[in-house]
Amino acid sequence: MPAAAKRAPTPAATVAGVALTHPDRVLWEEQGLTKADLAAYLVRAADRLLPHVADRPLTLVRCPGGRQKSCFFARHPWPGMNPALGRARVGADETVVVRDAGGLAALAQSGVLEIHPWGATISDPERPDRLVVDLDPAEDLGFAAVMAAAREVRDRLAAAGLAPFLKTTGGKGLHVVAPLVPSAPWDRVHAFAGTLAEAMERDAPDRFLRASAKAERAGRIFIDYLRNTRGASAVAPYSPRARAGATVATPLAWEELTKDSRPDAFTVATMAARLAGPDPWEGFAQAARPLPSSP
């Protein structure tokens, strides 16, 4: 190709003080969403996203070439990591730290399509400040069954004295999340969540199970309580997913669960209007309660 016909490289774009190289690189091919689109979304969502990811150990899903190319998990700092991202030690491990909108833009620069934080902060990593119940349905179940399960988890947690909040996962399931006063250690939070899952399976074994084996899951919902384990993580509220549709894990008000609800209703391309509206998780931190003795 003659030199004059070669495509000129796209100049770097700057978002929240972070230079994006190859800002027009497509990360979700079906929607044509680019690295610049991802950075703009994360910065727009920063006020709601940062309270759930800032100063927490993170598991990140990096897809530098786009979601349909090679993706991998990143739990530790990497060579050439943008200086807008921090580092912190948690025990023997070093973790990536996000503290501000610039850090979110730096994640986009590194092709991070998913953000999965611990349920504890770097300053207090041994005492979780949230409990997560992940409702993962079998392939043959519709969303109505997942909504009914979420309401049941809500009612059980509320009866125990906790304040349950709801979010889509960006997949087929839902998360019910209860903020905690960080006083109980991981083993107690894990045991509490396991007891809840065990009770739901015992009361309705045709609907629920607490074993993760997919061969046993037909027609039922896996109540994944293992998110409440030291080192485990759950997708953050407002995190995109490396999935077809560029879906986003989205907080919901309980009243939003209706017969018309869809688990994939919210995407990177459509979130601007929702971010401009009321926050369904308003008062999340203030609703923290000590872990009850039993569910």
Image (tube, grey):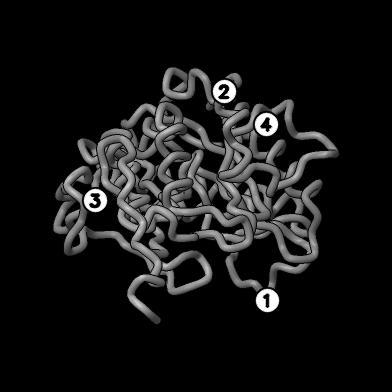
| Amino acid bearing label 2 | Ala
**Label whose residue precedes the other's in the sequence (4 or 3):** 3
Would you say 235 lies left or right of 149 here? left
The crowding category of the residue bearing disc 4, from other C-alpha atoms within 10 Å (few below 14, some 14 to 19, many at least 20), is some
CA gap, disc 2 and disc 1 = 42 Å
| Amino acid bearing label 1 | Ala
**Label whose residue precedes the other's in the sequence (1 or 3):** 3
Residue sitting at x 51%, y 37%: 294
Q: Secondary structure at mark 1?
A: helix
Single out the mark in the foreground, 2 or 1.
2
Residue sitting at x 73%, y 30%: 256
Q: Secondary structure at mark 4?
A: helix
User: Which of the numbered marks, if any, corresponds to residue 182?
Assistant: none
Where, by quadrant of the figure, is residue 61 drawn?
Answer: bottom left
Q: Which residue is mark 4?
A: 155
**Label whose residue precedes the other's in the sequence (1 or 4):** 4
Tag 2 near tag 1, CB within 8 Å? no
Horizontal and vertical percent position of residue 221 = 70, 57
Residue sitting at x 70%, y 58%: 137
The crowding category of the residue bearing disc 2, from other C-alpha atoms within 10 Å (few below 14, some 14 to 19, many at least 20), is few
Tag 4 near tag 3, CB within 8 Å? no
The crowding category of the residue bearing disc 1, from other C-alpha atoms within 10 Å (few below 14, some 14 to 19, many at least 20), is few
Would you say 109 lies left or right of 241 here? left
CA gap, disc 4 and disc 3 = 36 Å
Q: Residue furthest bottom?
A: 1
User: Which of the numbered marks, if any, corresponds to residue 276?
Assistant: 2
Single out the mark in the foreground, 3 or 2.
2
Q: Which residue is mark 3?
A: 96
Q: Which residue is mark 1?
A: 215
| Amino acid bearing label 4 | Asp
Q: Residue furthest right?
A: 259
Residue sitting at x 56%, y 44%: 268
